[in-house]
Amino acid sequence: MALVDHEMRILEAFAQNSRTTRECLAEGLRWDPDAVGRAFRYSYEERVTLHAWNGDAFRPIAVTLSDMFQRDEYIDDASIWEGIVQSDLCDAFTETMYRDDFFDEDEELFTAVYEGYAGIILGASDRSLQDYITLSTRSENLWQYLWEHRNRLTASGDTVLRGVACLIGASTCASQHRESPIIPTYLPYVGIHLFVYVEDSGENMLQLLDPFLMIYAEDDEEDDGDASDAFIRTFQEAVMDDLEGNLFFTRLNMVMETQALSFLRGGDNAECGLRKIAGLRSCLDTLLLLTSVPNIFPVLESRDCLPNVLRLAGTLHSRMPSNFYRPILCFLWQVL
């Protein structure tokens, strides 16, 4: 009997009276999340080795778990989330992401796995500081892997990029407002890379620079406003060395202009307007913080950052909340 058959029978034992995959998995997560992890792992292994000739048990597991992890009504107890974090299921998710052939999966499966793991990060971190620490520490190798395979990411198309962007958004959201946020070393690197190459302007795309901004004062014990070593190193390696600066600043200028025009066209749609402000503010904050990087001013000048910010200020003339203009004024103060 195949291992996946054995694990599926374990899951079925949890739900003798259940009629759906969702009910079965819900019972498994409550009483033995390790069994769910094994079913996840072995069903994917069977899928790729047998090319789904023997049926595809992985798809309903991955898609259903993804939906459950993003909807609180199915997992409403902090102890269940703790069990999930400590179980083999998290390792099964990340091991699947590590596989090179996983980049070639169809949109439904790739999205389900990445959004599913994003759901674990948000759901567990929101309920437990220890779960947040465990997941953040565990993800260090995943972000390094994604950075080292960044060319594979961009070659795989928008589905892959959107899935990784969703994971960045979840990791960033889980770290915001923490007294001591844990930002994996290569998370800002991947965020910068996707910011340059992802064309979509959805909500996750506007958060791609947030991990980079969050490490600005990471080791600033004296709180003197200087950029941290991690911030400077990330800028040098992810922007100047990897992208030669040009692509990053071209993209930054383009996004600011596009978001500004989109905001102006939004009219009275307040929700849309707030999202556009957040995206613009992220770009402007990035430019402002970059002024603390040594020898940055010739770089900013050569990439036309000053005239673009001046043009942006003119385009948005008195249309924004007053606090929105602070990074513009501070940036102009630094460079003029």
Image (cartoon, rainbow, N blue to C red):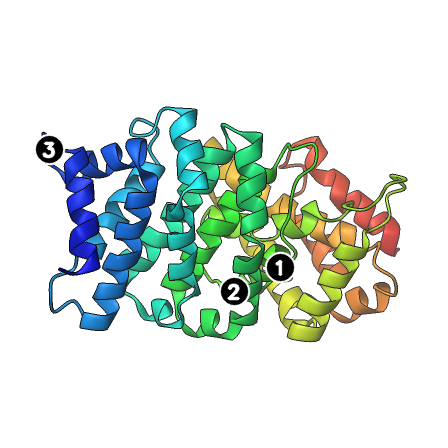
In the shown orientation, is residue 319 left or right of residue 219?
left
| Foreground disc of the pair 3, 2 | 3
Q: Residues within 10 Å of mark 3 (few under 14, many from 20)?
A: few
Q: Please provide percent x and percent y for residue 30.
A: 30, 31
Residue 230 placement: quadrant: bottom right
- Viewer-proximal residue, 84 or 60? 84
- Viewer-proximal residue, 208 or 252? 208
- Viewer-proximal residue, 240 or 202? 240
Residue occupied by mark 2:
146
Looking at the rendered image, the quarter that the N terminus falls into is bottom left
- Name which residue type carries label 3: Gln
Q: Residue at x 90, y 40 (%)?
A: 222
Residue occupied by mark 3:
16
Residue occupied by mark 1:
186
Instruction: Please report contact status of discs 1 and 2: CB closer than 8 Å, yes or no.
Output: yes
Q: Please provide percent x and percent y for residue 311.
A: 69, 55
- The earlier-in-sequence mark between 3 and 2 is 3
Q: Please provide percent x and percent y for residue 94.
A: 43, 56
- The earlier-in-sequence mark between 1 and 3 is 3
SS class, disc 3 = loop
Residue 241 visible in rendering: yes
Residue found at the very far top of the displayed protein: 77
Residue 8, compared with residue 106, is above or below; it is above
In the shown orientation, is residue 299 left or right of residue 169?
right
CA distance separating discs 3 and 2: 40 Å
- Viewer-proximal residue, 53 or 172? 53
In the shown orientation, is residue 3 left or right of residue 92?
left
Residue 75, compared with residue 230, is above or below; it is above
Q: Residue at x 56, y 70 (%)?
A: 148
- Name which residue type carries label 2: Leu
Residue 29's disc is: none
Q: Residues within 10 Å of mark 2 (few under 14, many from 20)?
A: some
